[in-house]
Image (cartoon, rainbow, N blue to C red):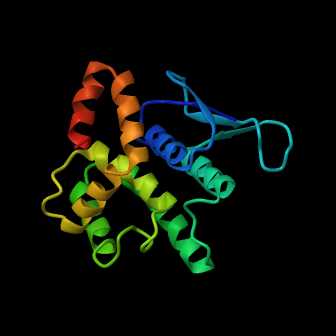
């Protein structure tokens, strides 16, 4: 069982999406002071393992669940690269068009950021694209990717759960994300 100390941010949404996608058992603890997680059943069967930092938590969960990291070394490296690329996305708020252009080019000849398989990198980037709220019409590959992920059952559950628990201001932002 994972205790997930949820904070309503794109980082929190990444983790909630991953947990919903994989079905790992978790207990969501809303309104936490900071994003964190405690794994009461770590794979090494040791004491409960506290975790922080969304990227580190996503990598840990991907390894624990056996989901979201491709099998080959090069593909795994690509997934990690895009996972960490999204950190630049977080920090470069005034450069949305430039970041969307990078994503659109990456998605030009493949379904997902790391190829044809949905990965932890897609889960990491989706909430940031969603949070930016910019029109995607100028980025057809990114728009296709965004639509495909928004239609996934885990994404629907994630944003539906957030919608039910959101404050009125958050509800307006979520209405733009959900179809």
Residue drawn at x 85%, y 45% as measured from the top left = 45
Q: x and y percent of residue 129 in the render?
A: 31, 51
Which quadrant is the C terminus positioned in?
Answer: top left
In this view, 49 is above or below 128:
above
Closest to the observer, 27 or 33: 27
Total tally of numbered discs in the picture: 0
| Residue pictured at 30% horizontal, 68% vertical | 102
Q: Which residue is found at the position 57% from the left and 44% from the top?
A: 23
Q: Nearer the viewer, residue 11 or 29?
A: 29
Q: Name the spot of residue 154 as percent of width and height, x first.
A: 43, 45
| Residue 139, image x, y percentages | 19, 64
Looking at the image, which residue sits at the far left? Answer: 137
Quarter where residue 41 is shown: top right
Give the quadrant of residue 39: top right
Residue 11 in the image, given as x and y percentages of width and height: 46, 42
| Quadrant for the N terminus in the image | top right
- Would you say residue 37 is visible in this rendering? yes
Q: Is residue 89 left or right of residue 142?
A: right
Q: Is residue 92 shown to the viewer in this render? A: no
Specify whether 101 is left or right of 162. left
The image shows residue 159, relative to residue 62, as above or below, that is above
Q: Is residue 16 left or right of residue 133?
A: right
At 50% across and 43% down in the image, what residue appears?
A: 20
Task: In the displayed orientation, state which residue is furthest to the right.
Answer: 46
Foreground of the two, 17 or 60 = 17
């Amino acid at each position: 069982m994972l205790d997930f100390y949820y904070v309503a941010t794109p980082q929190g949404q990444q983790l909630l999406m991953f947990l919903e996608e994989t079905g790992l058992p978790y207990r969501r603890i809303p309104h936490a002071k900071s994003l964190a997680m405690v794994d009461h059943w770590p794979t090494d069967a040791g004491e409960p393992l506290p975790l922080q930092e969304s990227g580190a938590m996503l990598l840990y969960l991907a390894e624990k669940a056996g989901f979201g990291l491709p099998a080959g070394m090069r593909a795994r490296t690509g997934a990690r690269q895009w996972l960490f690329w999204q950190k630049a996305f977080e920090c470069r708020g005034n450069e949305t068009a430039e970041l969307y252009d990078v994503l659109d080019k990456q998605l030009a000849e493949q379904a997902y950021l790391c190829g044809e398989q949905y990965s932890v990198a897609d889960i990491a980037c989706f909430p940031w694209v969603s949070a930016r709220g910019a029109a995607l019409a100028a980025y057809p590959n990114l728009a296709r990717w965004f639509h495909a992920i928004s239609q996934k059952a885990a994404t629907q559950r994630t944003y539906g759960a957030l919608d039910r628990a959101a404050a009125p201001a958050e509800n307006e932002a979520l209405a733009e994300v959900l179809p």
